[in-house]
Image (spheres, rainbow, N blue to C red):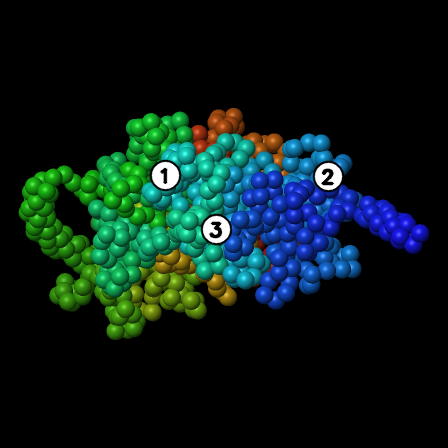
Amino acid sequence: MGGVTNLLLQYHFWFFFITFLSCFPAISFSSSDTLSSTQSLKTNETLLSSKQAFVLGFFSSDDSKYYLGIWYKNIPDRTLVWVANRDNPLEDSNGILKIGGETGNNMQIVDRTGKPIWSSNQTAAKNPVLQILDSGNLIIREANDSNSLWQSFDYPTDTLLPGMKLLYNFDTKMEKHITSWTSSEDPSTGLISFKLDFHGLPEIFLWNNQTKLYRSGPWNGVRFSGVPEMKSDTDTIKFDFYEDEHQLYYTFTIGNESLFSRLIVTPDGQLQRLTWVPDNQVWTKFWYAPKDQCDDYKECGPYGLCDTNASPVCTCMKGFSPKNKQAWNLRDGSDGCVRNTELDCGTDKFLKVQNVKLPETTSVFVNRSMNLVDCGGLCQKNCSCTAYANIEITNGGTGCVMWTDELVDMRVYTDGGQDLHVRLAASDVGGSEKNNVEAKAIGITVSIAVVLLGLLIYFIWKRRKLRRVLKGRTESRGGFSQDSLMNEPVFTSNRGKSGESEMDELELPLFDFNTISTATNNFSEENKLGEGGFGSVYKGRLMEGQEIAVKRLSRNSGQGTEQFKNEVRLLVRLQHRNLVRLFGCCVEMDEKMLVYEYMENRSLDSILFDKARRSILNWQKRFHIICGIARGLLYLHQDSRFRIIHRDLKASNVLLDEEMNPKISDFGMVRIFGTNQTEANTIRVVGTYGYMSPEYAMDGLFSIKSDVFSFGVLVLEIITARKNRGFYYSNDELNLLGHAWNQWKEGKALEMIDPSIADLYSPSEVLRCIQVGLLCVQERAEDRPTMPTVVLMLSSETVLMPQPKTPGFCVGRNPNETESSSSKQDQSYSVNEVTVTMLHAR
């Protein structure tokens, strides 16, 4: 009886125990790959993919914080490929992962109190299921549907697995990249990242925070231009790069399921492709970057070629020489190379450089349907084009990529790379060695003859000049004897009085004061062309008939001397058809004067803002002026010996010659940048209200992009014949930029055009210029194009242009400003200082 009782008691015990357990979900999921909305995952539990390739579970760091991650199942040392809450860890092991239910249709990690620590994006699932796949992808899907509604592959951490994508979606603006751990033990977001750059011809960059470390080069149809060892093999690994109007991505796939391969970014700044070797039970570094000195970004600077087989590794292409010879000899090639001979658009030729990693392509012209011959023809016609190449090397070479900026981050390979066609002066392209020797011999002979002839002409001219000057002075001074003037030179700086001995180095013709005074009729009011903050400008005529414009600095100007030195030192080295030409200067009797070529039509503002005269500027002339200013600014920013920031580009500082050719003038406020310098800061903001970029006016930060902003304002003024200062549309408190922005958004941009142009214009050309102007005045400096891009957009109807964003300085009227005062200031021939606190940003 007792035995029966015991049996009955045992039966009831197990019956109630099993019934009790059936009320709760199972506590172990190590044999399951899914989690439903009625289940949860604790920190000591895991999900396992169906073929036991990957595990989802919690892991702890050295400081006992817990993270949800994915790792390989059959690799002894746990190798993590994804971390969900990398920046929001659990403080202890008392946390769970759940899906759906009260949390909505997403997954969520909560701590011991039920407080959410991390969650995925919301999905539209009605009956959600979480599943770990054999690809290493974690998905949320409907219980009865295999299609994912959310996936971890869209939110990579430091690892790119087969099938994952580095991606940019143009429709949604979604971007995917991989970012390192902070350290080998800390999975939080680190500083190193590997990102697609979709601008120009897309390529991928390795970054340390905001600093570029390495560049892959663009995709050439087979591999990245900078990774010649990258070869697809359908049996093992296949690389894919895809681009259309909707998206752009890079991915790779593995043909053998038993082979594990991954691409990672490490906390110490390396990009590595690792492959698991089962026999040795180790991860093998299949490929990595940067792997040598030539992989370092911009190692050899602009126009420099990096070659690991050379010593030193940096070399200059034919037609170029080291910019900083001393640093070059010390194995520092970061300053790069400079041209031996200035370009001449009409006669330039192209040098074919073989087996190179193509230069950086973030701001290039791209046409995938154009062949190489047509590409070269287009580059030849565009004076801003510095090089061209095929986009892809397949099918004998297809597509066209064209550079208008400096060529940077190039390296040469023994086997690999692509052909690049670089623009050079015809004399630098040359021919055979024999021809070069003969050419040099002929050149030396001709040079000697030219020098001798030049000296003869100079002495004859000097003698005649002296006679004319002496004759003129005798007449003007009431008959001084010739003997009393024989010892007075035609040009003298009188440096002993002025203390300007530094001017010796300028190699610039020095006019004496009396010559300038005579030429300007003793600086009469009738000869005055204008007046500005640093002095006045006069028209003059030299004895031999040459018309000149004389900029006479004010004696009481606190900054006059420094501005003068700055302008002279700079202009003596600058030569361009769209920059005003400097004839000489005068430093004598406490006077400081600059002697320029005289411009028959004076300044642009004197015509553009004059109701009676603006009609002489038809659309063709205005477009010609816009393009000329752009070319002049491009020369300052890129093609001159220095990188020059003008800082005061405005309508009154653009002069027009007899044929309405524009020439940028007034270089008193320029700043010269080094090769690698991109911006600078000043506590003394100078410029003209209405043309100053927001970052310069507010923070004193200036760069080439601040000049681009001024150019954009100028473009809109030329189109509308309205000043950005002093122009307000109706009563909506908008300046010209704000009004132009509203008209553009409403599709009424053509209504802004100056009525004096009538209907004699090309609507597409005007709209292109308005779009360029608005792109240049965007509020954020990084959104504005560079001048090479601007010149390309103005010169080509086929270039695709982005839509502009909100402009900077859509400001309201300054209550202290009157129309008359603004007009007076705009007539200035030099820089006007502004008080920054008077600017009101909206």
Q: Which residue is mark 3?
A: 264
Residue 271 at least partly seen:
no
Q: Which residue is mark 2?
A: 128
* Camera-side residue of 568 and 23: 23
Find residue 314 and report its horizontal and vertical position in percent: 26, 54
Q: Which residue is mark 1?
A: 231
Secondary structure of residue under mark 3: strand
Comes first in the chain, label 1 or label 3: 1
- Residue at 52 percent of width and 31 percent of height: 245
Residue neighbourhood size for the residue with mark 3, other residues' Cα within 10 Å, grouped as few (<14), some (14–19), many (≥20) = many
Q: Is residue 48 visible?
A: yes
Mark-to-mark CA distance, 2 and 3: 31 Å
Looking at this rendering, what residue extends furthest in the front direction?
Answer: 1
Q: CA distance from mark 1 to mark 2?
A: 41 Å
The mark that comes first in sequence, 1 or 2, is 2
Q: Nearer the viewer, residue 614 or 352?
A: 352
| Label 1 environment density (alpha carbons within 10 Å; few <14, some 14–19, many ≥20) | few
Which residue is at a point 44% across and 33% down the rendered structure image? 799
Observer-nearest residue: 714 or 779?
A: 779
Residue 387: % across, % down: 31, 40
Amino acid bearing label 3: Ile
Q: CA distance from mark 1 to mark 3?
A: 19 Å
